[in-house]
Every structure is written in structure tokens, then in C-alpha cells.
Image (spheres, grey):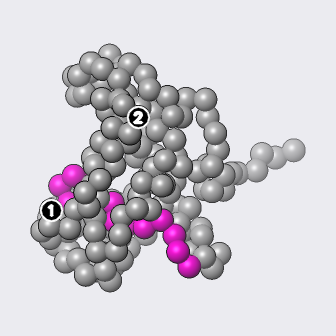
Amino acid sequence: MPKTRKTWRQKLEEGHSEHGKVVDVPPKMQNRFGTGTMLIPKPLDVDTLISKVPKGKLATVTQVREKLAKDAHAHCACPMTTGIFLRIVAEVAEEDLRSGKGEVTPYWRVIKADGSLNEKFPGGAQAQAARLKEEGHSIEPGKGRKPPRVKNFEKSLQKM
């Protein structure tokens, strides 16, 4: 029998024994994060946090990771799993919009630490830019290989 592919929602809601655990920072990551503890977040925790960013405000991926870590009493949150779960949150929101759901998690309000847009989101940086423009943000074009970024994004950052 062929294996059926999971929906993005199933991936978001799926429980995994490692999700939500606080572990020691792996040796390979200690140059970047130092020693201490690292949260392996739950996808639903990423979704919940992003859903609190109001229209007109922004959050950086770094802020999301820092808030997740703080809430779990850890030194940091895993950047890899947080990034993967952010992508899952975005895909779930798009699935929900396609199925007619009116309100979805506003993943497009999450930008990179330097204000640049996320090319891995559904529709790429262009789709994220269009949504952010609708909410009143100005977008600077990318330079070279760099993606577009939100102009003066610091003024719109949400306190987390």
C-alpha cells in the first residue's frame, strides 16, 4: 500500500518525543551559542507565538527563538527546528486560506534579523512583500543575491 503524504496541518500537530525538550547545547553548536541548554521547540508553540504578532507589527526569527527559549527556561532555542517549524506554520496558513478559513497565523510578519524577507515562505519573498505592503510596511528591493527587506523594520518590531 502506498504511503500517503502528511498534510502540513498533520506536521504541525504531530507529537514527537524530542519536541518541547530542553537539552544541552550540542558541541557542534557551542561556538555559536556557548554552553548551556537549548530548547527543541514544539511546532504548535511556534504557531502560538507567531499568532500573537498583531497587524502592523513584525517579529524577527531571532526574537521568536529568544522568546521560546525564555519561556522554557533555556539559554537558546534550536535554530534549525525553529526554522523548519516556521515553514510548517506558513504552509498550514496557506492550506487554511485555500480551504476558506478567514483568519490564519500571520507568518508573513516574521522577518530575518536584518529585516530581510524569507524566500522559503510560500510564494517566496515577493508574496511576503505583498502582504507586508498591504499592512503598511515599505519594502526595499534586494541587492545582488540579497532578498528584499522591510524599510526601517526596527520601528515595527513587536515586543515579545
Mark 1 secondary-structure assignment = helix
Which quadrant of the figure has residue 115? Answer: bottom left
Whether the magenta-drawn stretch holds residue 32 is answered as no
Q: Nearer the viewer, mark 1 or mark 2?
A: 2
Residue 100 on image: x %, y %: 63, 79
Mark 2 secondary-structure assignment = loop
Whether the magenta-drawn stretch holds residue 112 is answered as yes
Cα distance in 3D space between marks 1 and 2: 26 Å
Point out which mark residue 72 bears. 2
Residue 53 on image: x %, y %: 36, 64
- Near mark 2 (Cα within 10 A), the count class, few <14, some 14-19 or many ≥20, is some
Residue stretch in magenta: 102-115
Q: Is residue 142 visible?
A: no
Residue at 14%, 70% in the rendered image: 151
Please state which of residues 81 and 57 is positioned toward the viewer in this rendering: 57
Residue 24 on image: x %, y %: 38, 19
**Residue 28 falls left or right of residue 14:** left
Work out which quarter of the rendered image holds the N terminus and state it: top right
**Residue 123 falls left or right of residue 156:** right
**Residue 15 falls left or right of residue 104:** right
Please state which of residues 72 and 104 is positioned toward the viewer in this rendering: 72
Task: Report the magenta stretch's main SS.
Answer: loop
Which quadrant of the figure has residue 158? Answer: bottom left
- In the depicted structure, whether residue 117 falls above or below residue 6: below
Disc 1 residue type? Glu
Which residue in the protein does label 1 denote? Answer: 154
- Near mark 1 (Cα within 10 A), the count class, few <14, some 14-19 or many ≥20, is some
